[in-house]
Amino acid sequence: MQYRTLSAAEYRDAEGRILYEDNHLLVVNKKAGEIVQADRTEDETLTDLYKSFIAMRDHKEGSVFLGVPHRLDRPVSGIVVLARSSKALARLNDMFRRGDMHKYYWALVCAEPPQPEGKLSGYIYRIESQNKSYMCRPGAMRSDAKLAELEYRLLHRTERYWLVEVRLLTGRHHQIRCQLSDMGCVIKGDLKYGAPRSNRDGSISLHSRRINFIHPVRKEEMTIEAPLPVSWKI
């Protein structure tokens, strides 16, 4: 199997974004703008980047296995967990499905939350052609709507924005973006959900900050945290 040869700068960058690695897991800090899995753009994926990195680092001539048990939206940054073995992938898939991977996000929002902390619960549906999710309104339930729940708490206020931590209780398409916008707290830079202006780099100010889980093979408790993008001013 032939993998792309990374430049020295690309190699150092990929290496510096590894948050945890062993024989079963690779946890990396995704940049906003990277895609985790292939889409119609045919841009290089995060998975392919790290396959090339591992092949170079470990001088592997055969194929490199990296399984994808979850993903982040393209404009979102932060923690992505990849599986380095088929055993780990199967177990991680089950853990994400059961909600055993406890994910915390940080978001810069454009308005103060109505309460300093709380729980949001409602039903979300997705319109595929728009790549966008919507909240069901009372009396207008849809058969394709799914329950979406999260907890949030206000952490800090900057000059213009509010920093909110979100704990996902379910994993729906664009859930955080949709539910925070519905609460009146659209995420900075998120034009799709009502932000007044974009971020210069095309990102939205949503970052997968921390994850807690039991290692799928070693059965050890894990807590992994990803540093914020340098563009964040908080």
Image: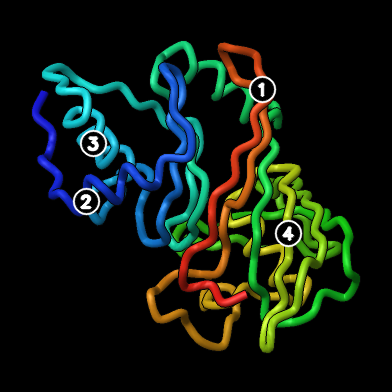
Quarter of the N terminus within the rendering: top left
**Secondary element at tag 4:** strand
Disc 4 residue crowd, few under 14, some 14–19, many 20+, Cα 10 Å: many
The residue labelled by disc 3 is 53
Task: Give amino acid for label 4.
Answer: Glu
Report which quarter residue 100 is drawn in.
top right
The residue labelled by disc 4 is 165
The residue labelled by disc 1 is 214
Q: Nearer the viewer, mark 4 or mark 2?
A: 2
The numbered dot on residue 10 is 2
Choose between 169 and 206: the one closer to the eye: 206
Q: Is residue 79 above or below residue 21?
A: below
Quarter of the C terminus within the rendering: bottom right
Q: Nearer the viewer, mark 4 or mark 3?
A: 3
Residue 38 in the image: x percent, y percent? 30, 44
N-terminal of the two: label 2 or label 3? 2
Disc 1 residue crowd, few under 14, some 14–19, many 20+, Cα 10 Å: some
